[in-house]
Image (cartoon, coloured by chain):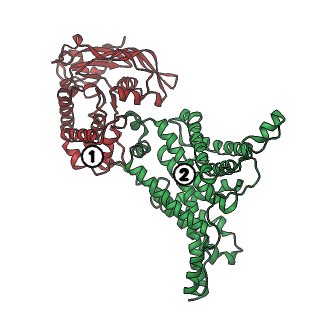
Amino acid sequence: MPEQLIWGMEVFFNGLMAGVLYALVALGFVLIFKASGIFNYAQGVMALFAALTLVGIMEGQVPFAHLINAIFGTEIHHFGWHVPGLLAILLTMVVMIALAWAVNQFIFRHLVNQEPIILFMATIGLAYFLEGVGDIMWGSDIKKLDVGLPQGINGPIDELTYNIFNYGFFIDNLDLVATLVAALLVIALVIFAQYSKQGRAMRAVADDHQAALSVGISLNFIWVMVWSLAGFVALVAGIMWGTKSGVQFSLSLIALKALPVLMLGGFTSIPGAIVGGLIIGVGEKLFEFAVGPMVGGATENWFAYVLALLFLVFRPQGLFGEKIIERV
Amino acid sequence: MLDGAETEDSLLEVNNIEVIYNHVILVLKGVSLKVPKGGITALLGGNGAGKTTTLKAVSNLLRSERGEVTKGSIKYRGERVQDLVPSELVKKGVIQVMEGRHCFEHLTVEENLLTGAYTRRASRGEIDADLNMVYDYFPRLKERRKSQAGYTSGGEQQMVAIGRALMSRPEMILLDEPSMGLAPQLVEEIFNIVKSLNENEGATFLLAEQNTNVALRFAHYGYILENGRVVMDGPAKELRENPDVKEFYLGMSDEGRKSFRDVRSYRRRKRWLS
């Protein structure tokens, strides 16, 4: 087999893995968009905030340490304890639920029945506000996140591919874990939405929130629930990305990579977010591999958007976007 | 049987309410009405008369549309309810079926019905029994239970909307414009079901309807709204015989057909507006 093809296959698999991470971020967008029609620009920042909080809690950092020290003239930075990974994740989830509650309480419940563009602007405001809060709370230095996920080259795959192609593929263990987690997450979300009472209420709210209100579904409860779910997805995405490339501001920019994923997969489809993520991941890696060297590289920065534009022109609702049911 | 509505104790009492949308638009200018327990009460009137707003004031769906009851009181079983949120009212047994059906399009017919039981803490068995009760009243829904509500016909969607409300085990159903956009035969079918629900399940109805003719045949008592005020009320039988109602709402006249221009000028002179 020609070398180029074998390398291409490795790139393909790595693209799939990268795609899973994009899909994780896109998933958070889909959840909120479906249930409330809000395009949550802050989803990426939520992932950053979740990762920052997780690191902060694990390392026993004192939140708002700088602020406290500046006001009271103290010199505290650490509680002096370390919280084990799993417990820290649970505590972070509590923080994300509190965030979901606050977002609904102070912003979106006052914006019921407003234009989508106003809601969108509110999420932009939320994004930058949350970024600032994250900074003040946990400091702005780059942090390492290690909750004990396996990292580095996967031995068995390396060996297996070496035996077949005489060339060992480099597949990162972390990417494999991320794939597994994403798959479980999606299955759990789909089961929740399809078969549970609250999931059904969530879909009802997504379809027609006036009617949902009329049968006695509390919109505030559903919205807090949906933002909490999105917070949970953000936390998972934050853990994966944070472990991969450190917890830093650029983490929030992955949200921008989720945009083309959504255009491809459709804003309202959970499977769409996954498939869209995979297509974008594989597409940009293969494109970089095949065409990149001819044009001086860095095609990954824009290829996804070109793909998304093509989709917008030929299939605006995305691959899996909900068909708009209209009867006359 | 309930034609002499005044003597019954009323389940719902609306007392001189005023409703303002968006802090500026005055929609109801003092509406009062009583709904007796176990009766069908009709709210009649043209477009923009305030029928829907009255229903939404009772179910308190107003607030999510930036509307507000600024004066007067709404009492359900003698208890002031205008500050309750819709879910609390549903738990108390008051549920609204909104105008234009408002089904959950992407949910199946059965899932739609199940959302109606959202506020109840009932066992799976009780819920199943109620589902069967709904299917008995609307056999068509049983055939279509697995299809997405968005793909069912207008009549079926209206049945889904009413069935969904029934699933909350309501005492009182606020039914807004059930005849809207339906063929006359279907309108008749729906109203017959409303009547049998009223007689067999003891459900009280407050019904907003533009189709005065049908509404007055099925209701016990009627209120006529115009421009945010009640201009006339009485037992349905009397309203049916009233010459003004006949002329303005039923399109009948003792003097035979008139030219449109005459009707308009006559109308202008004889409006019930105070």
The N terminus of chain A is located in which quarter? bottom right
Looking at the image, residue B88 sits to the left or right of residue A155; the answer is left
For disc 2, the neighbor class at 10 Å (few under 14, some 14 to 19, many from 20) is many
The residue nearer to you, when weighing B80 against A123, is B80
Residue type (three-letter) at the residue carrying disc 1:
Ser
Q: What residue is shown with label 1?
A: B153
Looking at the image, residue B82 sits to the left or right of residue A137; the answer is left
Vertically, is B33 above or below A194? above
Looking at the image, residue A290 sits to the left or right of residue B246; the answer is right
Q: Mark 2 lies on which chain?
A: A
The kind of secondary structure element at disc 2 is helix
Q: Percent position (x, y) of residue A178?
A: 56, 63
Residue located at (61% from left, 43% from top): A95
Q: Percent position (x, y) of residue B255?
A: 17, 18
Chain B: give its colour: red
The answer to whether any part of residue A258 appears in the image is yes
Supply the letter of whichever chain is green.
A
Residue type (three-letter) at the residue carrying disc 2:
Phe
The label nearer to you, 2 versus 1, is: 2
Looking at the image, residue A70 sits to the left or right of residue A296; the answer is right
| Alpha carbon distance from label 2 to label 1 | 33 Å
Q: Mark 1 lies on which chain?
A: B
The kind of secondary structure element at disc 1 is loop
Q: Percent position (x, y) of residue B205?
A: 26, 25
Q: What residue is shown with label 2?
A: A29
Residue located at (31% from left, 34% from top): B168
